[in-house]
Image (cartoon, helix red, strand yellow):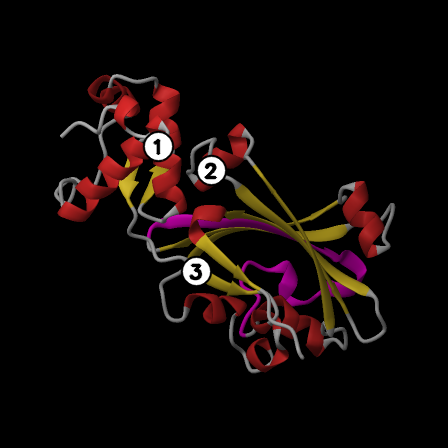
C-alpha cells in the first residue's frame, strides 16, 4: 500500500514512509523474514530518494522497532537492550563476593568474550592518567557478546609493577574479576570516574562490533582509584548504542 500523496499531507515524506512501514511491522508483514526490503527496493516502491528512505528507517530505529546490521540490512528488532547501571554494577557488594560486573548488567543472559592479555608500553594518555609515564602496563582487551550479538569492546590497562604475579595478567582473572584481584593486594577500587563521548564509528570500529557506519557508538573511559586515590585501572569501552540503555543512579 502506497503512502498518502505528500501534497495531501503536511507530514514530511520520510515520516509518511515511516508511518507506512510501522503499520506493516505491526500487521506482521515482515514477520516471516524479519527483514525489511533494501533501501533501493523501498526507494523504488515509494518513488523517492534513498536518503528519504534512510531517514524513515532512522525514525523506526529511534522507536526500537528495527535495527541495522553491518553488511546485511535492516531487521525487526529482537535484541532486548542491556540496562547498564554505571553506579550499581561497580558496587563492591557484587565483585567483592565473586560475582562478575556483567552479572548485574545481563541478569542471567548468556555472555562470551574474546580476551587478549599482554604487557605493553601504554599510550601516553593512559600512562599519564595512571602516573606511569615511561613504564609498562598490563593490557586486557576484550570483545563481549551476548545472545550472538557483539555488544562491547573494552581495553583495560593496569600498572605493571602493581599487578605483577596476579591473575590480572592471565586470561581468566577468577571470581570477582580484576577488581577482586586488586582488592586482594590492597588496592581495591573505592571510587571511579567515567568520561563519555558519543559519535559515529570508524570503519574498523564498526567491523569490530558488526554494526553499520550510521550506528552511533558510546565511548566510556573509566578510571578506578584505590583508597589512597591512586589510579589502578583505566578502561576504555566502546558500546554499540543499539544494545544499551545507560542508567546513572545517585544518592539523594
Comes first in the chain, label 1 or label 2? 1
Residue, disc 2: 215
Residue, disc 1: 11
C-alpha gap between disc 2 and disc 3: 16 Å
The answer to whether one can see residue 73 in this image is: no
Looking at the image, residue 136 lies above or below residue 249 = above
Residues drawn in magenta: 148-175
Looking at the image, residue 199 lies above or below residue 86 = above
Image quadrant assignment for residue 87 = bottom right
Whether residue 168 appears in magenta in the rendering, the answer is yes
C-alpha gap between disc 1 and disc 2: 25 Å
Q: Secondary structure at mark 2?
A: loop
Crowd rating for badge 1 (residues with CA inside 10 Å; few <14, some 14–19, many 20+): few
Q: Secondary structure at mark 3?
A: strand
Residue ID at (34%, 41%): 60
Which circle marks residue 82 in the picture?
3
131 horizontally vs 172: left or right: right
Please state which of the two labelled residues, at mark 3 or mark 1, is closer to the viewer. 1
Q: Position of residue 180 (x, y in %)?
A: 63, 74
Whether residue 127 appears in magenta in the rendering, the answer is no
Amino acid at each position: 500500500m502506497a503512502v498518502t500523496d505528500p501534497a495531501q499531507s503536511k507530514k514530511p515524506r520520510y515520516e509518511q514512509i515511516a508511518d507506512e512501514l510501522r503499520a506493516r511491522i505491526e500487521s506482521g508483514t515482515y514477520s516471516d523474514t524479519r527483514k525489511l526490503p533494501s533501501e533501493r527496493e523501498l526507494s523504488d516502491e515509494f518513488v523517492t530518494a534513498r536518503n528519504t528512505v534512510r531517514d524513515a528507517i532512522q525514525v523506526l530505529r529511534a522507536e526500537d522497532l528495527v535495527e541495522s546490521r553491518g553488511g546485511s540490512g535492516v531487521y525487526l528488532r529482537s535484541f532486548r537492550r542491556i540496562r547498564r547501571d554505571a553506579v550499581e554494577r561497580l558496587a563492591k557488594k557484587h565483585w567483592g563476593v565473586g560475582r562478575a560486573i556483567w552479572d548485574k548488567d545481563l541478569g542471567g543472559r548468556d555472555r562470551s568474550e574474546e580476551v587478549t592479555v599482554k604487557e605493553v608500553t601504554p599510550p601516553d594518555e593512559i600512562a599519564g592518567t595512571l602516573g606511569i609515564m615511561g613504564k609498562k602496563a598490563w593490557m586486557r582487551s576484550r570483545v563481549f557478546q551476548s545472545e550472538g550479538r557483539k555488544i562491547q569492546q573494552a581495553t583495560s590497562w593496569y600498572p605493571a609493577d602493581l599487578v605483577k604475579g596476579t591473575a590480572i595478567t592471565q586470561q581468566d582473572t577468577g571470581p570477582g574479576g580484576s577488581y577482586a584481584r586488586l582488592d586482594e593486594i590492597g588496592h581495591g577500587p573505592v571510587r571511579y570516574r567515567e568520561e563519555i563521548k558519543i559519535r559515529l564509528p570508524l570503519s574498523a570500529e564498526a567491523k569490530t562490533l558488526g554494526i553499520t557506519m550510521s550506528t552511533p557508538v558510546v565511548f566510556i573511559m573509566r578510571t578506578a582509584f584505590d583508597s589512597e586515590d591512586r589510579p589502578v585501572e583505566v578502561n576504555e569501552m566502546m558500546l554499540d548504542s543499539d544494545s544499551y540503555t545507560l542508567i546513572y543512579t545517585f544518592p539523594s
